[in-house]
Every structure is written in C-alpha cells, then in structure tokens.
Image (spheres, rainbow, N blue to C red):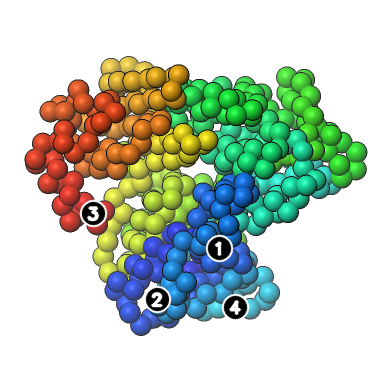
Amino acid sequence: MNYVIIGNSVAAVGAIRGIRKVDAEGNITVLSRENHTAYGRPLISYLLGGTVTEKRMPYLPADFYEKHKVNLLLGSEVVSVDSANSRVALAGGETIPYDKLLIATGGDPFVPPIEGMAGKEKVFTFTTWDDAAKLKGLANDINRVVVIGGGLIGLKAAEGLYQIDKQVTIIELADRILSAAFDRTAGRIVAKKMKANGIEVITEDTVVRIDGEGSEITGVTLKSGDFIPCDTVIVAIGVRPAATFLKGSGVEVNRGVVVSDSMETSVPGIYSAGDVAEARDFFSGNKNPMPIWPDAYIQGDVAGISMAGGEKGYQGGLAMNSIELFKVPTISMGITNPEAGDRYEVHTYQDLENYQYRKIVLENGVLVGVVMVSNVDRAGIFAGLIRDKVAVAPFKEHLLAPDFGFVHLTKEIRSSLFAPQGKAA
C-alpha cells in the first residue's frame, strides 16, 4: 500500500502512528511545504521571545521518521490533486502517486484587504516557525507593533514581542479579547494581565488603513478615527482551512474538507484530518472545522487506522482551547457561552485580583462546559467528565473548588474515567 500524507503537523503524526498500528510495511510519504520537521506551533511565540531555542522546537524523537519508515519530503508544496488518476502534483512539476491520501494541511492565515497594505514591508502573519524567525531577524528594526486580532494567535504574538522589548497595541473588533474561545470574564482577566505588562488593548474597533510612505509604515487608522503610531503590523485575525489546492479534485469542501467519522472525504481513498477538516461536533453532531491540537492528533489517528484498513470511529470534536500568557494559564472546553434561558445551569468562582476564575456549565445535570483561569491542573478530569457525559450531582458542590480532583468522584466514576477505553479515546 502506498500512503501519501500532505502536511506534517500533529494530525500527520497521529496518522503515521495510526497506519503503523495496522500496516507495518506500507510505503508512507509525507509532503510538507515547510522546511522543518514537526514542531510545536504554540512554541513560536517563545521562539520569538528568546525563551525557546530552535533546537527545542521539534517535539518528535530525531529518529521518528526513520523508525516509522517514512519518506519525508520537506519544502514540497502540493498544488493539485488528480483523484481520477490517484496522483498529487507539486509546485516544482513533479507528480506523486498514491493508493490512500491524507489531507492534513492545517490552516492558512486570513489576511483581509486593508487600505494602504500593498507594498508595505513590515506586515506579517504569525502562525509558523518561519513567521517567528522572520520577526526575530528584524527585531532591531522594530519598535512599535500593532497586532490586529485579540484571539489566541494575536495574544501569543503580542507576548513574544513584549519579551523582546517592543511596544505592542492589540486591536480587537469584538467587545473583549479571546471572544471566540472564552467568556467575557476570562477575556477581561487576560486583558488585565496584558495591560499590567504594558500591552495596550483596544476593543470594539478595527484597522481600516495602514498609513505610511512607500514601503514604510508610520501607523494605522482605526474605524473610530483614532491613529495608532507603529512601524510594524501583525495580522492575526484567524485562519482558514488550507484547501484551495483541492479545486477540481472532486473532494467536497465546505468551510473545511468534509469528512465522515472514519475521516474519509467524499472521494473514496482520500481522507482528511486536523485544522483543514470539517468533522462532527461532539455536542451538536454538526460538522465544523475544529482547530484544536489534541483533536487534530485524534483525527489523524482515526484517519491512519482507517486508511490502513482498520476500524476506528471519530467520537466528535470537543472545542478546547488553552493559552498561557505571562504565566497565567487558561483553558476553555465545551460550551462556554451558553444561550440564555432555562436549558443551562451556570456556576462561577472568581478572584479577579489574583487572576483566578472558574466557570462550569451544566445541562440536565451533566457537565458540558468549563472555563479555567490560573488553576488548570485538573483540566483533564473535566474533559473526561464532559466526554463521558457524567451526571455530576454527587459532587456538584465541589466542581468550583480549587482542590477539585479524583478524590471527589465516586468509585464508579473514577473506574470509568480510568478504564482502558477512556484512555484510548
């Protein structure tokens, strides 16, 4: 069997291991447009800030690809897929045949058209190792930076820039930072921490023009009319599934590549996993892109096993986001901004002075959402309770306690969370 994987991040790693669980000898070729082996994307802000070296970026053992008999082709960008003849075409003109194909290309940064952007040299995105390296290389020529977007990517870019002594202003269109992943209180706590470290945060506004002469930037003009002086702009509005090369392939692409629970696309023999895929949501059953690191690995594992002829179904993606900013860790999972009404029961604990916050969301006595700021040590327990749809009545009063843990669970629940099938999931 000849397996080809497009992309080389965590979903690809899960797929390689999944394939080898079933097929020890088939040929595996991994095509990556980047020139690096698999690395921790959350680390790029620390690479920029100088707290992580390039040697620490890869997260796999040095012999991973050799041990798993993988032919790794770095700097190889796929430009089209010929599903009729089971071949992929590279930017250099070469074509590579496959028996089973996995699309694990992740996401591309979304850069909207902004007046004055054309021709400006110091406009960047911040999603890859090379993005961070480029900014670090220009550090001596950067003083003031405007980051457009107050989501996970924008905040990590801001933190990395702060670590190399740059003045940073974050511009966020929503009424708070982290609006997509966290609730209003968590966003407010994180904004307070950012401001305490000298990072300016402007919400409910957006950049309408990048000002300057020729290739130089002098500042940005906001929708409100305010002018923010800067010499560098980072666009961190979000990412889109990297699937444009699939045009004409017959593979169904909605917001992402649409997949079944075996991670197979609309074209038999072609699979997809990770940020580029549109898979089933754990709660609603609707299909959505789920740009979550652990989920990408799970999808990759399911895809790899399925490609090799094994059977493993995807249980649905659970929205989960984690970010640490200035040593304040935060995690959100599940339904964190529930609709108003009687359907959900919400409980919170907060100590804003010490950047501590916890929120739990229940539906019919079952935990469906959690937000944690500062004390996140037992987040795995909460994730297990959500996935196993555990009725929390026996220990409900302990859920908000800082020391909540396995000791508060019944023996039956502890056994189910520690069961082998729970670990496999």
Quadrant location of residue 423? Answer: bottom left
Left or right: residue 288 versus residue 88 is left
Residue that carries the numbered disc 2 in the rendered image: 68
Mark 1 residue type: Lys
Q: Nearer the viewer, residue 165 or 44?
A: 165
Could you give the CA–CA distance between mark 1 and mark 3, rounded to whole angstroms?
A: 31 Å
CB atoms at circles 1 and 3 under 8 Å apart?
Answer: no
Mark 4 residue type: Thr
- Density class for disc 4 (Cα within 10 Å; few <14, some 14-19, many ≥20) is some
Secondary element at image label 4: strand
- Density class for disc 2 (Cα within 10 Å; few <14, some 14-19, many ≥20) is some
Secondary element at image label 1: helix
What residue is drawn where x is 28% and y is 57%? 313
Could you give the CA–CA distance between mark 4 and mark 1, rounded to whole angstroms?
A: 32 Å
Residue that carries the numbered disc 3 in the rendered image: 423
Could you give the CA–CA distance between mark 4 and mark 3, rounded to whole angstroms?
A: 40 Å
Earlier in the chain: of badge 2 and badge 1, it is 1
Earlier in the chain: of badge 4 and badge 1, it is 1
Residue that carries the numbered disc 1 in the rendered image: 55
Quadrant location of residue 306? Answer: bottom left
Could you give the CA–CA distance between mark 3 and mark 2, rounded to whole angstroms?
A: 23 Å
Could you give the CA–CA distance between mark 2 and mark 1, rounded to whole angstroms?
A: 22 Å
Residue that carries the numbered disc 4 in the rendered image: 95
Mark 3 residue type: Lys
Earlier in the chain: of badge 4 and badge 3, it is 4
CB atoms at circles 4 and 1 under 8 Å apart?
Answer: no
CB atoms at circles 2 and 1 under 8 Å apart?
Answer: no
What residue is drawn where x is 39% and y is 41%? 320
Identify the disc placed on residue 100.
none
Q: Nearer the viewer, residue 54 or 227?
A: 54
Mark 2 residue type: His
